[in-house]
Image: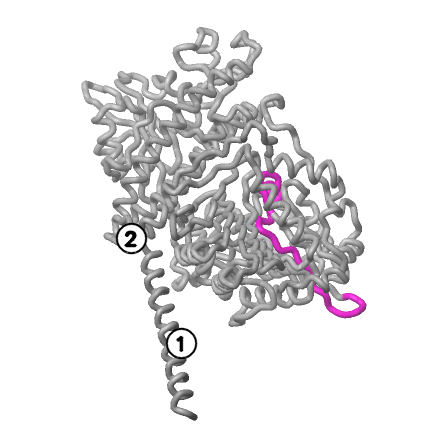
């Protein structure tokens, strides 16, 4: 080699080394930049912004009146759960002395301070909305009476009803040296009663019984009005309180309510029997620490002091209510027979209606089918499991269950399958929050008929939605699957937007089998044909898919991503999305709830747009679209972009292999992105602004459009089935 060649080689090597060194330095600099707290929105504050968007619907005159009341009720339920879990967790951190920082740089104490201020504002907003809705309800024939408005006839009626129906279930509890402070159950409403007896002032508590309806109706014969006339149960008790304390002077009566920490914490390593451990844990959490004490604003200081001391809460955990409490109970009004005040009934088309089991399997054998709930009926999923129970050629049924509801036909079909001699294996997730009790009941019923029941994987929640049916056919064993984004719950399928895939794809069947081996045994398989499985391959798989878009953008090929999810909170994924934006990858994120990412930041997230759709149905489907250099790739599944979904749960994302279904899913995303009625844009500061339609633009309500798509143009559901088997072969995932 000549000296010149040698010099050139050395120069080239130095250049390469210098380039690599420069890239590494840039990468470290970029990583350091992306770790700045200012680039992230606090998770809890983002969730509260979501609940505010739900509350906005209660003020939106485009919704029928009772639907607006329903939205107010939902915000009440949501906020209760927020205090039961999220606030309770932060209080636990404070109690334990934790100083760990969130992605946005807040300590637990700082978070709690921000949450306290924001929730107080939200509680005031709820009262304002109720003040707005109440007179509108009265104009529409639904009236609520205050005590001062009771006529003598109503007083007599309510007294009689009180003595016959309410009084027998009331138990006044005294508090004095001979009576310990009574246990106050979570979410309960109570009256703090101060009485005077023998010149002594004493305290008592009366629980508002939750076994009775919150709103008592006054018959027309008593009210003299042709309206739905209601009174509040707590008012009926308050106005008849002397019946509970005869011979005493009632000095004061004030309403209060508490919310406790109900987050079930299980030491799984120490559990010999997870079902029994969860069962015992459910009994224990009723004694969880109080995360909120809500009292009437006018409550005397002495009474409040007694409550706060015995509930062991600080001033920051006390909320003084300016009016009614527990708006969650307003859901009771949805039972009223007033269709003119509700959304028009929606009857989704039914795919495979009345199809015999043999033909059902034959259809799925030759093509994939996409189900889009609630715009299409949940019936095909139930029909498939029912067919599996009845078809003599079916050998085994394997399924994961997270939330199935209290009256589940799915469970009944699984029981029938086990009784018919099928090999039935069911993972029942006992740690599904707020559904633990239901799931324990179902697990025991399934075990009683001989089904193999697994309670979950240690330290992991199984959140995936997968059903695998193994069938003996003339050409051998074939697997049929349903993979979904939502729970196997017929009720929620009517109010949640979700997707399901019916397929007999051989390679996906192999993956599904490996997933169940992982759940039931000790499989350590790390690679799958198509499925992305958490905590094994989902995070790394998403990283690779995002990296591929980054590479496409750098090399000038078509790139871009559209993610439709419930939450975006994982800092590592957010950093990846920031990195993709930095090289020019356009991203549309459709995020229903929490979003810790900040869009539109110069040099960080200029290519990212975040939207949120809040409408008649709860947006729940997850869709991951990758432009992939002009050959789009789409995944659906149960996983959100949260650390728990990617690292602490069993989750599945499944690819859409069928070209026709892929194209349809892109149309779904495009329609959602074009919504200009119930869509909000996320701003850099973490707040949201509602998209206002331009005067020249047509109004696009995506949820209404979907109803029209499926009901009018596609009454049988067949249009949105996949392409033929031959077409599938030519459109494999790239």
At x 53% / y 47%, what residue is drawn?
438
Taking the view exactly as shown, the residue that stands out farthest to the bottom is: 1
Q: Which mark is residue 16?
A: 1
Image quadrant containing the C terminus: bottom right
Which of these two is toward me, 390 or 730? 730
Q: Within 10 angstroms of label 2, few (less than 14), some, or many (20 or more) residues?
A: few
- The tag earlier along the polypeptide, 1 or 2, is 1
> Residues in magenta?
473-498
Task: Compute the Cα span from label 1 to label 2.
Answer: 39 Å
Which of these two is toward me, 75 or 709? 709
Residue 485: where, in percent of width, then height? 58, 51
In this rendering, position of residue 677 left or right of residue 309: right
Which of these two is toward me, 366 or 356? 366
> Which image quarter: residue 347?
top right
Which of these two is toward me, 391 or 343? 343
At x 60% / y 68%, what residue is drawn?
529
- Whether 478 is among the magenta residues is yes
At x 40% / y 14%, what residue is drawn?
147
In this rendering, position of residue 38 left or right of residue 597: left
Image quadrant containing the N terminus: bottom left
Residue 517: where, in percent of width, then height? 57, 68
> Which image quarter: residue 414?
bottom right
In this rendering, position of residue 733 left or right of residue 693: right
Number of marks in the rendered image: 2
Identify residue for label 2.
Answer: 101
Q: Nearer the viewer, mark 1 or mark 2?
A: 1
In this rendering, position of residue 347 left or right of residue 39: right
Residue 629: where, in percent of width, then height? 58, 60
Res 277 visible:
no
């Amino acid at each position: 080699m000549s000296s010149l060649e040698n010099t050139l080689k050395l120069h080239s090597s130095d250049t390469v080394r210098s380039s690599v060194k420069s890239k590494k330095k840039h990468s470290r600099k970029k990583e350091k930049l992306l770790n700045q707290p200012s680039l992230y929105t606090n998770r809890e504050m983002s969730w509260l912004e979501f609940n505010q968007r739900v509350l906005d619907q209660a003020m939106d005159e485009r919704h029928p009146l009772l639907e607006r009341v329903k939205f107010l009720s939902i915000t009440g339920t949501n906020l209760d759960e927020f205090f039961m879990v999220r606030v309770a967790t932060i209080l636990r951190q404070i109690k334990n002395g934790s100083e760990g920082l969130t992605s946005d740089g807040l300590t637990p104490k700082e978070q709690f301070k921000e949450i306290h201020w924001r929730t107080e504002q939200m509680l005031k907003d709820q009262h304002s909305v109720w003040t707005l809705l109440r007179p509108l309800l009265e104009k529409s024939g639904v009236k609520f009476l205050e005590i001062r408005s009771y006529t003598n006839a109503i007083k007599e009626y309510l007294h009689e009803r009180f003595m016959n129906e309410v009084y027998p279930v009331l138990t006044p509890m005294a508090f004095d040296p001979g009576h310990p402070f009574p246990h106050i159950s979570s979410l309960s409403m109570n009256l703090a009663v101060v009485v005077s007896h023998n010149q002594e002032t004493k305290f008592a508590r009366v629980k508002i019984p939750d076994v009775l309806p919150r709103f008592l109706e006054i018959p027309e014969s008593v009210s003299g009005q042709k309206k739905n006339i209601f009174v509040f149960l707590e008012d009926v008790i308050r106005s008849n309180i002397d019946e509970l304390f005869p011979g005493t002077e009632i000095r004061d009566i004030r309403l209060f309510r508490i919310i406790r920490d109900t987050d079930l914490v299980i030491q799984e390593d120490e559990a010999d029997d997870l079902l029994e451990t969860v069962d015992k844990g459910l009994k224990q959490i009723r004694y969880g620490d109080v995360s909120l004490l809500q009292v009437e604003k006018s409550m005397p200081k002495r009474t409040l002091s007694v409550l706060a001391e015995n509930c062991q809460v600080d001033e920051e955990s006390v909320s003084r209510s300016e009016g009614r409490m527990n708006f969650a109970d307003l859901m009771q009004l949805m039972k009223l027979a007033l269709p003119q005040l509700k959304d028009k009934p929606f009857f989704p088309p039914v795919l495979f209606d009345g199809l015999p089991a043999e033909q059902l399997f034959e259809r799925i054998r030759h093509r994939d089918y996409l189900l889009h709930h609630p715009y299409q009926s949940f019936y095909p999923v139930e029909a498939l499991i029912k067919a599996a129970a009845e078809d003599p050629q079916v050998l085994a049924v394997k399924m994961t269950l997270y939330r199935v509801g209290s009256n589940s036909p799915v469970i009944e079909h699984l029981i029938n399958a086990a009784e018919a001699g099928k090999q039935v294996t069911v993972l029942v997730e006992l740690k599904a929050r707020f559904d633990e009790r239901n799931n324990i009941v179902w697990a025991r019923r399934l075990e009683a008929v001989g089904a193999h029941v697994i309670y979950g994987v240690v330290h992991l929640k199984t959140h995936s939605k997968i059903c695998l049916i193994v069938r003996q056919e003339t050409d051998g064993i074939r697997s049929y699957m349903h993979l979904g984004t939502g729970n196997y719950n017929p009720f929620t399928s009517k109010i949640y937007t979700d997707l399901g895939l019916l397929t007999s794809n051989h390679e996906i069947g192999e993956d599904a089998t490996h997933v169940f081996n992982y759940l039931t045994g000790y499989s350590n398989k790390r690679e799958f044909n198509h499925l992305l499985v958490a905590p094994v391959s989902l995070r790394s798989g998403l990283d690779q898919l995002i990296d591929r878009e980054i590479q496409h953008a750098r090399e000038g090929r078509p790139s871009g991503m559209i993610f439709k999810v419930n939450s975006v909170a994982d800092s590592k994924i957010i950093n990846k999305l920031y990195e993709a934006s930095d090289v020019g990858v356009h991203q549309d994120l459709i995020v229903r709830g929490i979003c810790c990412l900040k869009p539109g930041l110069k040099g960080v997230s200029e290519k990212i747009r975040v939207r949120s759709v809040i409408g008649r149905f709860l947006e729940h489907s997850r869709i991951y679209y990758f432009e992939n250099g002009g050959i789009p790739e789409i995944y659906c599944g149960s996983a959100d972009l949260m650390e728990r979904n990617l690292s602490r749960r069993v989750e599945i994302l499944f690819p859409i292999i069928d070209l026709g279904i892929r194209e349809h899913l892109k149309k779904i995303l495009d329609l959602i992105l074009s919504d200009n009625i119930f869509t909000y844009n996320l701003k850099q500061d973490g707040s949201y602004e509602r998209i206002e339609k331009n005067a020249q633009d047509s109004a696009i309500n995506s949820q209404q459009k979907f109803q029209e798509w499926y009901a009018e143009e596609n009454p049988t559901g067949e249009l949105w089935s996949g392409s033929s088997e031959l077409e599938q072969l030519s459109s494999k995932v790239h």
